[in-house]
Image (tube, rainbow, N blue to C red):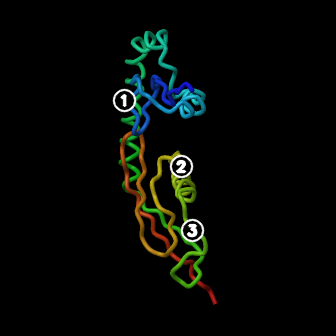
Amino acid sequence: MKKTSHLISVVLKERLRGRGLPGDVVSVKRGYALNFLIPEGRAVMATKPNLEMLEQKRNDWLSIDEKRKAEGKAIKDQIDKITIDIEHNTVDGFRLYGSISSKEIIMQLADKGFAIKKEDIVMKPIKEIGSFTAQIHTYGNQSNITINVKSPEVIE
């Protein structure tokens, strides 16, 4: 029985956290490359014509990456100043009925004018009242955002 390799080489067209910079040739799992990176336009197969094209386009990709990094730095500086206040129903005055996930944080940031993707937020689901911190990654920059969760006031 012939053993096949599960890794293939691709040329990155943009920065991928944990993988590399634009123009880098990296080995990734076959399914990851064929089902995600290549169809999404984030990478191309590392064939001889593509490697020749790489030399021509590498500087363009790096300049785009530098622009995105600068934009990410500007966004980071703005996000670091933000505090999000969320009111959520509770079961016993302390534990939340349900939980708060990155989806709610994305909606709150969108209301403030930021377009953040789900994969850019690192946080555990919030299940109780209190103050919490979430990490937001924007093009290689890491921001910390404070999330204050409180119970809505009961009006009698």
Left or right, 135 with reference to 96: left
Disc 1 vs disc 2: Cβ atoms closer than 8 Å?
A: no
Mark found first going from the N terminus, 1 or 2: 1
Mark found first going from the N terminus, 3 or 1: 1
Q: Amino acid at mark 1?
A: Glu
Q: Position of residue 64 (x, y in %)?
A: 42, 26
Nearer to the camera, 8 or 48: 8
> Residue at left 56%, top 59%?
104
Q: Secondary structure at mark 1?
A: helix
Does 36 sit above or below residue 114?
above
Residue indicated by mark 1: 66
Nearer to the camera, 30 or 43: 30
- Work out how far the residue at label 1 is from the one at label 2, CA to CA, in angstroms: 22 Å
Q: Nearer the viewer, mark 3 or mark 1?
A: 3
Number of marks: 3
Q: Amino acid at mark 3?
A: Ser
Q: Position of residue 46 (x, y in %)?
A: 47, 18
Residue indicated by mark 2: 118
- Crowd band around label 1 with a 10 angstrom C-alpha radius: few (<14), some (14–19), many (20+): few
- Work out how far the residue at label 3 is from the one at label 1, CA to CA, in angstroms: 37 Å
Mark found first going from the N terminus, 2 or 3: 3
Q: Secondary structure at mark 2?
A: helix
Q: Amino acid at mark 2?
A: Lys
> Residue at left 37%, top 51%?
143
- Work out how far the residue at label 2 is from the one at label 3, CA to CA, in angstroms: 16 Å
Does 127 sit above or below residue 156?
above
> Residue at left 41%, top 23%?
25
Residue indicated by mark 3: 99
Does 144 sit above or below residue 19?
below
Q: Secondary structure at mark 3?
A: strand
